[in-house]
Image (tube, rainbow, N blue to C red):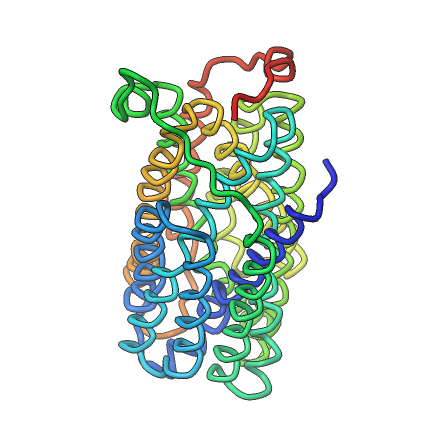
Amino acid sequence: MRLDGWLLAVCAARTCMTSVFMTYAAVLPVLRTEWGMSGTAAGSVSTGFQAGYAVSLVVFSALVFLYSAWLSAVSALAFGFWARSYTTGLVLYTLVALSQGGTYTTAIMLIADRYPRERRGAAVGWLIASSSAGYALSLLLSGPSLAWGGYETAFVVSACGPVVGVVVVWLVLRGTPNVVHPPGTGVRFGTAVLKNRPAMRLILGYTFHSWELLGMWAWTPAFVAASFAVSGAGSVRAVELASYVSASFHLMGLAASSSMGRLSDGLGRRVVLLGLAATSAACSLAFGWLIAAPIAVVVVVGALYGFSALGDSPVLSTALTEAVSAPYLGAALALRSFLGFGAGAVAPIVFGRILDLTNVPGPSPTTWGWAFVTLGLGGLAAAYCARGLAPDRVKALRATPSVR
């Protein structure tokens, strides 16, 4: 489907909002030295961010997109100007995440109300692609900003994105109606969601998917920087180059999000989910062992990793909008996001702990394979959940009119 004006504006706002998400990951090798962090401590900052995001997705799902956008802009600026140690970084980065929930879950609900089923996968795909664009933008801004003025400059520059985003959100959503779906008679949350086997399988699949994806996002820039360092690049130059390469991985995720949702509209949700989850699991199991491989190999495998790890996200989101009735969709998305981003909050600190256990103490680990294997276990579990879904009825899906 083509991007209409409304969806284009929402996606642009989402891109701006998420332009602060990857800044910490981009400059992590430098921060480990500047802030004196072990791998576990470094992972805990990403864990605080993901935990805050998980909570925000539950709390803000009942609020307006615009309110969350304003809070995001303020907290991003606070992070940019005052995160100067492990403690302030942990607190302020978590605050950024706590303010972001209303720019994601509510956007999916707005799309579910606006687009029919046969176009919804593509529309949700564009939304998630816009997040990938924001992550890539975050990395692209962080690399030269770090080289020019240190991590402090990188933080401030990336914090400007949410400020632009809130202006875009205000312009586009002020004329968008707020649709309220009354619950059906005799139907409760337990029946509509918790006893809904397809919905719960999709929620579990998203949880394992998030474990793999968010752990990978938190640590891949540092891994790529370590690969450049092994090949002979200086420390700051390695981090700068890694930010550009990691940005390309997010651009692959952008391509996946904008295409896999549309592909699932045609081929069906199950087959696309299974193929992508199996591919990303294979990448997780192999990627960390490539630390001494030629950079070209790291880039190629990382690009496939970035594509497959994110590609199932719009399909999982779209499938859930079809499995749960409209009055309970917000609650189902909140539960899914809480579990998914909760798992994603644990993954970075587990990854960091495995790094500490499998390397000699210091800020430059050389053994990364076992840490990435822990992410691959999540990918395998997500593939198992996808395999258990009922076969798709693609023709019926196309023929069924939207009820929203």
How many tags in the picture? Answer: 0
Residue 164's place in the image compared with 88, above or below, is above
From the viewer's perspective, tell me whether residue 391 is left or right of residue 31.
right
Residue drawn 32% across and 81% down? 85
Residue drawn 57% across and 12% down? 393
Q: Residue furthest bottom?
A: 149
Question: What x and y, as percent, mark residue 38?
Answer: 30, 71
Identify which residue, 353 or 140, lies in the foreground.
140
Residue 117's place in the image compared with 396, above or below, is below
From the viewer's perspective, tell me whether residue 60 is left or right of residue 287.
left
Residue drawn 57% across and 39% down? 124
Which quarter of the figure is the N terminus placed in?
A: top right
Question: What x and y, as percent, mark residue 184?
Answer: 34, 20
Question: What x and y, as percent, mark residue 82?
Answer: 37, 83
Residue drawn 31% across and 56% down? 354
From the viewer's perspective, tell me whether residue 201 is left or right of residue 225.
left
Question: What x and y, as percent, mark residue 308?
Answer: 57, 40
Asked which quadrant contains residue 115, the reply is: top right
Residue 219's place in the image compared with 263, above or below, is below
Asked which quadrant contains residue 332, the reply is: top left
